[in-house]
Image: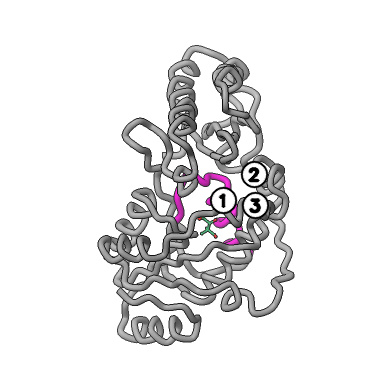
């Protein structure tokens, strides 16, 4: 596996691959890689001749400076994992390489980006669109892989690709969970043992709500999850919304949509976690 830190070198290598008729898959990441990322790379390796994994903690998508500073950075371990799962290239550029000048582009994905993470983290999705579009221009992949844990991000990236008419396929991949149910996240490493235990309430509440939803209204199901989280010491709910999986707008009744997804964000101590669960559709 090659570790590359400049766009020039990356383009030159990928140009040769393309000239040899090889397909290119891209897995954008912010590093601190775990089995969830590995599953994206494994899928990309199956579906493409050459797989590039970008490892870049993108400053423009952090609306909280503290969060950016404490974001885990583990490039050496990341490269070891990527080598094992068959990536051809780890692209780990500097901030200067990706942002030689300030990126003043303003994207609008309304109404997808005005709700949930978009409402709680102003500017977050603009920063995601800035870096992901730069990565798409640098790599020119045939396919790019994103996890469904960041459910809203996936919808917004699909919309960005439509808006910019980019010639690539976006592949959404299922959430990977720890054996006890916790959704895998680079942020999990920031949890203390106690917080990690409490964080389990998130997935257990979501799983239990799927059965609850079979015989209860949407409003009651929403309250069911909210009550469990609010009753757990150390968890501070930011939102729990049941939305249409395509428009991301809240629905009020199960009959309002054929694709219903519950999206949650909360603080476990100082660590912000998100998760989601499908109630119907989206297969
Ligand atoms: O999902 C992430 O890790 C990031 O938002 C992404 C897509 C790599 C952009 O920085």
Select label 2 or label 1 by which is in front.
2
Q: Disc 1, ligand 1: is the CB inside 8 Å?
A: yes
- Classify 196 as above or below 25: above
- Whether residue 233 is visible to the viewer of this picture, yes or no, is yes
- The mark that comes first in sequence, 2 or 3, is 3
- Whether residue 47 is visible to the viewer of this picture, yes or no, is no
Left or right, 229 with reference to 145: right
Q: Are marks 2 and 1 in contact (CB under 8 Å)?
A: yes
> The residue tagged with tag 2: helix, strand or loop?
helix
What is the quadrant of the C terminus in the image?
top left
| Coordinates of residue 158 in the picture (x, y in percent) | 55, 56
| Coordinates of residue 146 in the picture (x, y in percent) | 46, 54
Residue located beneath label 2 in the image: 117
| Coordinates of residue 43 in the picture (x, y in percent) | 32, 56
Residue located beneath label 1 in the image: 153
Q: Nearer the viewer, residue 142 or 153?
A: 153
Instruction: Specify the segment rendered in magenta.
Output: 146-163
Residue located beneath label 3 in the image: 66
Q: Main secondary structure of the magenta part?
A: helix
Q: Separation of disc 2 and disc 1 at Cα? A: 9 Å
């Amino acid at each position: 596996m090659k570790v590359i830190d400049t766009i020039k070198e990356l383009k030159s290598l990928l140009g040769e691959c393309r000239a040899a008729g090889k397909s290119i898959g891209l897995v954008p990441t912010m590093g601190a890689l775990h089995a969830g990322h590995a599953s994206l790379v494994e899928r990309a390796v199956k579906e493409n001749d050459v797989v590039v994994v970008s490892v870049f903690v993108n400053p423009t998508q952090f609306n909280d400076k503290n969060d950016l500073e404490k974001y885990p950075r583990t490039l050496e371990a990341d490269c070891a994992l990527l080598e094992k799962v068959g990536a051809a290239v780890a692209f780990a550029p500097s901030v200067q390489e990706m942002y030689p000048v300030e990126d003043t582009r303003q994207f609008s994905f309304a109404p997808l980006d005005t709700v949930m993470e978009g409402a709680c983290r102003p500017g977050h999705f603009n920063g995601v669109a800035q870096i992901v579009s730069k990565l798409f221009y640098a790599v020119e992949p045939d396919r790019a892989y994103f996890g469904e844990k960041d459910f809203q991000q996936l919808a917004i990236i699909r919309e960005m690709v439509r808006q910019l008419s980019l010639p690539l396929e976006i592949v959404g991949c299922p959430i990977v969970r720890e054996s006890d149910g916790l959704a895998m996240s680079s942020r999990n490493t920031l949890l203390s043992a106690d917080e990690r235990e409490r964080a389990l309430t998130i997935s257990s509440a979501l799983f239990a709500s799927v059965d609850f939803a079979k015989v209860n209204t949407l409003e009651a199901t929403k309250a069911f999850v909210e009550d469990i989280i609010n009753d757990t010491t150390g968890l501070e709910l930011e939102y729990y919304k049941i939305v249409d999986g395509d428009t991301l707008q809240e629905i009020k009744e199960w009959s309002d949509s054929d694709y219903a997804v519950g999206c949650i964000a909360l603080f476990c101590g100082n660590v912000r976690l998100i998760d989601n669960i499908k109630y119907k559709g989206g297969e």
